[in-house]
Amino acid sequence: MPTLNRLRRPLRRARAPIAIAAAALAALLAAGCSASAATDGSAAAKPSSSASPMAGCGSMPGMTMPACPATSSAEAAAATAAASAGGVNPIPTQVLGTADWQGMKITAEAMTAVPFLIYNGTTMQEVKPPKNVSFHLMVLLNDAQTGVAIPYASVWATITEGAKTPFDESLWPMISRYMGPHYGNNVVLPGSGTYHLSLLVSPPVSARHVEYQDVWLTPHRVNFTFRWKQTS
């Protein structure tokens, strides 16, 4: 798992911008949730009006997350305005790849990078996307049959382009009203091109009900190839 000391730049104590960031985040996630687009590994991902593929946008036993709301033109405009006000370049949500691991659906998505908050149990600190950020990488782990989110795992993501490795980090465990529990971090790529994404998913470390006693017992790696078109 990443620690606060591993961040490339020192984190600053969140002040007034947190309220603005939170508003922008909520608006952007509401818009992004219904703008998924799949990639086939050879062509650029195209925006789609269909909802995000995760069932119910994630849920946990005893805590049901709301389904993705339909995005109206007014909501989309509000999301764009919120992003522009925060200096964030909106991008359509793209599905970078999906895989199945013993009944666990692994979904990797790219979405608009916005500020997020890290709470360590005592203090709250804000992480702002760098000016040259490409997207926010989000990995969802769900039961393939029920769509229920699977927490308590860890995900290490490596993105390569030929011999170059522009991203090689552990993803933060995150919670979101619209996406539910997931794993994510902001990614900076050198530009447009074809990239290889490798995800190392470690077993959920938790007590388990008996239906999960024989699955996800060792780390598992999945690999995707995606085409990224850098926006200005």
Image: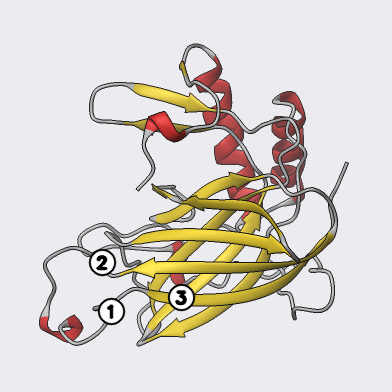
Point out residue 158 in the picture as x, y percentages from the top left corner.
57, 60
What kind of residue is marked 1?
Trp
Residue type highlighted by circle 3? Arg
Location of the C terminus (image quadrant): top right
What secondary structure is found at the residue carrying circle 3? strand
Indicate the amino acid at tag 2.
Pro
Q: Residue at x 25, y 84 (%)?
A: 215
- Mark 3 touches mark 1? (CB < 8 Å): no
Residue 224 quadrant:
bottom right
Q: Position of residue 26 (x, y in %)?
A: 55, 39
Residue picked out by circle 2: 204
Q: Is residue 44 left or right of residue 59?
A: right
Q: Are marks 2 and 1 in contact (CB under 8 Å)?
A: yes
Q: Nearer the viewer, mark 3 or mark 1?
A: 3
**To which residue does mark 3 refer?**
221
Residue under label 1? 216
Instruction: Answer with the quarter of the image where residue 52 lies.
Output: bottom right
Give the Cα separation between the discs numbered 3 and 1: 12 Å
- Are there few (<14), some (14-19), or many (20+) residues within 10 Å of tag 1? some
The one of 58 and 231 positioned closer to us in this rendering: 231
Q: Closest to the observer: 34 or 133?
A: 133
First of labels 3, 2 by sequence position: 2
172 is higher (above) or lower (below) than 228: above
